[in-house]
Every structure is written in structure tokens, then in C-alpha cells.
Image (tube, grey):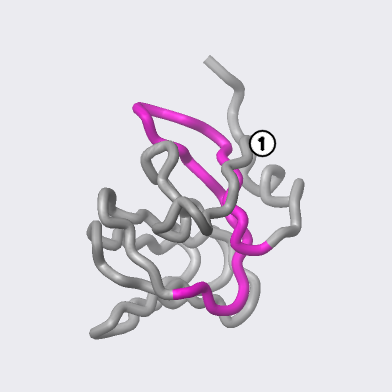
Amino acid sequence: MSDAIDLAEKLASFSEQWAPRTVAEFNGHDVMVARIEGEYHWHAHPDTDDFFLVLKGEIDIELRDRTVHLSEGQMFVIPRDVEHRPVARGEAHILLIEPTGTPNTGDPDTAAPRQVI
């Protein structure tokens, strides 16, 4: 059993945007935090849903047929294989949960390398 995990402390340990850091693992899933700002590219995850929880700031999850706006404390689950694009108009901090090894871009060739902090 480990100690409590301070998400703000983990987020303060790096400054890169769109580069999730794994802060815990459970049942074959990574719990990650990320700093984001600007527009990410359109992508989908063919094998898994995508979980977003906003810790700080606001983000939009653009889908092909609508946009879901999330404020601090709000979450959204994007169903597997649904094309989406996260957008943060100012810096935002998010928590993500995905099966370990899921490429953040939906494509293993362009995914950010996993980093555990």
C-alpha cells in the first residue's frame, strides 16, 4: 500500500503540455495527470473508452456532432472508437484513466511515451 498521492504536487513536477504522466496503476489501468493548452488533434481509441476529469480550468471535448464543455470537477467518458479532439483555451489540468499501454493519440506510432512519476 502506498501513501496518498498529491495530484497538484505531481502536476507541479512537469511543465510539458499534452504529455500525460502516470501517477498510479490499478486493475490494468493507468491513472494519469496532464497539463493541456490549445487544440489537440482529432483521434479515436478503437479498443477503449476515454475518461477525462477536469482538475483545473476548463476544456471542450469536440465530437464530430457536438461539443461537450467541462469545468473544474466535471468529467466525461468518450465511448470507444468515437472521434474526438480535446481543446483548452487556457491551461487546464486533467486526470485521465486508460488501460495501460493505450496510446494517447490513438496511434502507437505518434503516441507520447508513458512516463511514471
Mark 1 crowdedness (10 Å alpha carbons): few <14, some 14-19, many ≥20:
few
Asked whether, in this view, residue 14 is left or right of residue 28, the answer is right
Which residue is situated farthest in the front direction here? 109
Magenta span of residues:
17-41
Percent of width and height locating residue 26: 41, 28
Give the total number of marks visible in the rendering. 1
Circle 1: residue type: Ile
Look at the image and say whether residue 30 sits in the magenta stretch. yes
Percent of width and height locating residue 115: 62, 40
Residue at 75% of width from left, 51% of height from top? 14
Question: If the image is split into quadrants, where does the C terminus sit?
Answer: top right
Percent of width and height locating residue 4: 59, 29
Look at the image and say whether residue 83 sits in the magenta stretch. no
Of helix, strand and loop, which one carries label 1?
loop
Choose top left, top right, bottom left or bottom right for residue 53.
Answer: bottom left
Query: Would you place residue 82 above or below residue 95 in this image?
Result: below
Asked whether, in this view, residue 23 is left or right of residue 62, the answer is right
